[in-house]
């Protein structure tokens, strides 16, 4: 069974010094907490053909999708994608990232405080 690197990577959740950005390496079934006004960056790595579709599904207005981009130099495994969100209001949002190939769907829950 193929697993994207994101499943074996050690998840990283770190706020930068300005406390305006929270970054994480995507990992299925995680719960993240951010503050209203913070930006959330989610990085996903693909293994094999395909990519994570954009825009991802955002279940509520607690988060808004800002955009996505490819990051880093290309690697043979597949693209590394960065998805950016802004915490708009207190609440809970479920992010669903669907892959266009055979990699698994990633679902993360974000609590906005």
Image (spheres, rainbow, N blue to C red):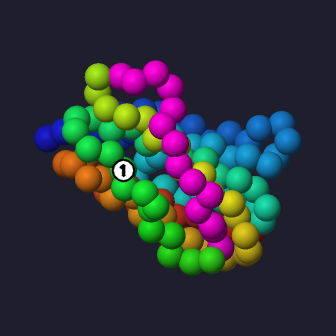
Visible residue check, residue 8:
no
Q: Residue 11: horizontal and vertical position, in percent?
A: 51, 39
Q: Residue 38: horizontal and vertical position, in percent?
A: 76, 56
Q: Which residue is mark 1?
A: 52
Quarter of the image that includes the N terminus? top left
In the image, residue 70 lies in the stretch drawn in magenta: yes
Horizontal side of residue 107 vs 69, given as left or right: left
Q: Residue 85: horizontal and vertical position, in percent?
A: 62, 57
The magenta segment? 62-75
Q: Secondary structure at mark 1?
A: loop
Q: Which of 19/79 is in front?
A: 79
Residue 48 falls in image quadrant: top left
Residue 105 falls in image quadrant: bottom left
Question: Number of marks in the image?
Answer: 1
In the image, residue 71 lies in the stretch drawn in magenta: yes
What residue is at 31 percent from the left and 32 percent from the top? Answer: 78
């Amino acid at each position: 069974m193929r697993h994207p690197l994101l499943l074996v990577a050690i998840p990283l959740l770190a706020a930068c010094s300005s406390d305006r950005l929270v970054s994480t390496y995507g990992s299925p079934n995680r719960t993240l907490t951010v503050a209203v006004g913070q930006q959330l960056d989610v990085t996903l790595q693909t293994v094999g053909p395909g990519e994570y579709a954009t825009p991802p599904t955002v279940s509520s207005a607690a988060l808004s999708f800002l955009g996505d981009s490819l990051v880093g130099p290309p690697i043979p495994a597949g693209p590394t994608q960065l998805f950016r969100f802004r915490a708009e209001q207190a609440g809970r949002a479920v992010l669903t990232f669907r892959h266009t190939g055979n990699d698994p769907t990633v679902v993360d829950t974000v609590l906005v405080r």
